[in-house]
Image (cartoon, rainbow, N blue to C red):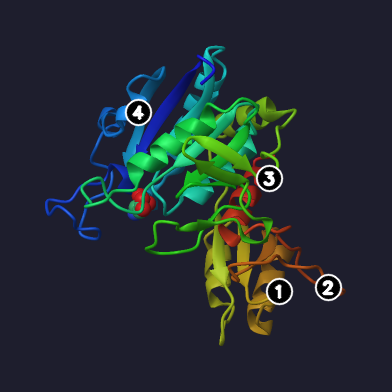
């Protein structure tokens, strides 16, 4: 460690989950332990210069824009302190990739912001949270690390590529074709590729976001056999601002759903085409009638569209 401090910000999740039945990995309640409890579960952290803050206490399936606003503000606050080397954020696994992508979009920080999590609650026979937290602190304390990344099961993923890809395994995250940024092995990093980009104008992006009085409403619809336009028409009727379609394969969309999406676009709703495939990105084809998501998954394309609609 450089002697600088790491700020640990907690938001809940399974890493802070407990069950009344020791060893029960399913029947637990997320977001029960506080940040002090998480730190106390890792003896190796006791001698390190840390500061901590409980920013939220939720199961991340219930993540809200208000929590994102507070998180962006608290990350920005800590990152601005000269004595802080980086930030570690404990988070549930369910929407971790969305929070990571959101924070990278509005902060693109020159210091590391490391999200970490657990697939098993703290009361598991062998909980994975303590090791993940220790690994995340190692990454946040690494000189030269920057941008928003996720650390789980000894692997470092970039915010743009990280995706929860398994419902149960401890190694639940992947980075698709891009591959991980690297690995954490006994506190040392083995890097495979570069850290996420640092933005030149992240302050402007953050200010625009913090000042927004209302988040644009962007919904995700999925293509599937027999898909039609009724859901799109209902959403347009409710005044939706943007739509992401999770197309099949290379972003293909059933003709009836596509007709409804084109009508929505013609009425002023922004429409973006992603893919429901877990890997790969939508490649442009001649004659495409709807723009593609530039490699973003549906949930991340939704965040990108919301942020662009703030303009
Ligand atoms: N539902 C939990 C959450 O996202 C799952 C987890 O953390 O693994 O908070």
- x, y (%) of residue 38? 29, 34
Label ID, residue 44: 4
Is residue 186 visible to the viewer in this orientation of the structure? yes
Earlier in the chain: of badge 4 and badge 1, it is 4
- Dot placed on the residue nearer the N-terminal end, 1 or 3: 1
Residue at x 31% of width, y 33% of height: 42
Instruction: Give coordinates of residue 167: x percent, y percent.
Output: 40, 64
Label 2 crowding class (10 Å Cα cut-off): few <14, some 14-19, many 20+?
A: few
Q: Name the residue under label 2.
A: 285
Q: Which mark is in front, 3 or 4?
A: 4
Residue, disc 1:
250
Marks 1 and 3 sit apart, C-alpha to C-alpha, by: 23 Å
- Which residue is labeled 3 in the image? 308
- The x and y percentages for residue 261 are 67, 70
Cα–Cα gap, marks 3 and 2:
24 Å
Residue at 69%, 61% in the rendered image:
272
**Label 4: few (<14), some (14–19) or many (≥20) C-alpha neighbours in 10 Å:** few
- Asked if 47 appears above or below 114 in the picture, the reply is above
Within the image, what quadrant is residue 310 found in? top right
Of badges 4 and 2, nearer the viewer stands 4
- Please tell me whether mark 3 sits on a helix, a strand or a loop: helix
Mark 1 Cα-neighbour bin, 10 Å: few <14, some 14–19, many ≥20 = some
Instruction: Please tell me which residue is depicted at 26% across the width and 29% down the height of the picture.
Output: 40
- The tally of labels here is 4
Residue depth check, mark 1 versus mark 3: number of the one nearer the observer: 1
* The residue positioned farthest toward the left in the image shown: 20
């Amino acid at each position: 460690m450089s002697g600088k401090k790491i700020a640990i910000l907690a938001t809940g999740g399974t890493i802070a989950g407990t069950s009344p039945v020791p060893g029960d990995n399913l029947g637990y309640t997320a977001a029960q332990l506080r940040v002090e409890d998480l730190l106390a579960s890792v003896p190796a952290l006791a001698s390190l210069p840390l500061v901590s803050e409980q920013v939220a206490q939720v199961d991340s399936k219930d993540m809200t824009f208000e929590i994102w606003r507070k998180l962006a503000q608290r990350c920005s606050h800590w990152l601005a302190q000269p004595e802080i080397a980086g930030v570690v954020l404990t988070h549930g696994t369910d929407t971790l990739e969305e929070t990571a992508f959101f924070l990278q979009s509005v902060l693109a920080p020159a210091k590391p912001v490391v999200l970490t999590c657990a697939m098993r609650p703290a009361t598991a026979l062998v909980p994975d949270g303590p090791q993940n937290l220790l690994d995340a602190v190692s990454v946040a304390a690494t000189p030269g690390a920057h941008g928003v990344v996720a650390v789980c099961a000894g692997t470092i993923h970039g915010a743009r590529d990280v995706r929860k890809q398994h419902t149960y395994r401890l190694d639940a995250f992947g980075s698709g074709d891009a591959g991980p940024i690297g690995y954490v092995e006994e506190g040392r990093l083995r890097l495979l590729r570069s850290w996420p980009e640092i933005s030149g104008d992240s302050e402007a992006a953050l200010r625009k976001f913090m000042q927004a009085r209302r988040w644009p409403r962007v919904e995700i619809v999925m293509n599937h056999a027999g898909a039609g336009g009724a859901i799109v028409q209902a959403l347009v009727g409710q005044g939706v601002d943007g739509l992401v379609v999770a197309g099949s394969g290379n972003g293909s969309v059933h003709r009836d759903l596509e007709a409804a999406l084109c009508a929505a676009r013609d009425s002023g709703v922004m429409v973006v085409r992603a893919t429901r495939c877990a890997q790969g990105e939508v490649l442009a084809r001649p004659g495409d009638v709807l723009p593609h998501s530039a490699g973003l998954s549906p949930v991340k394309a939704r965040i990108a569209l919301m942020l662009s609609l703030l303009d």
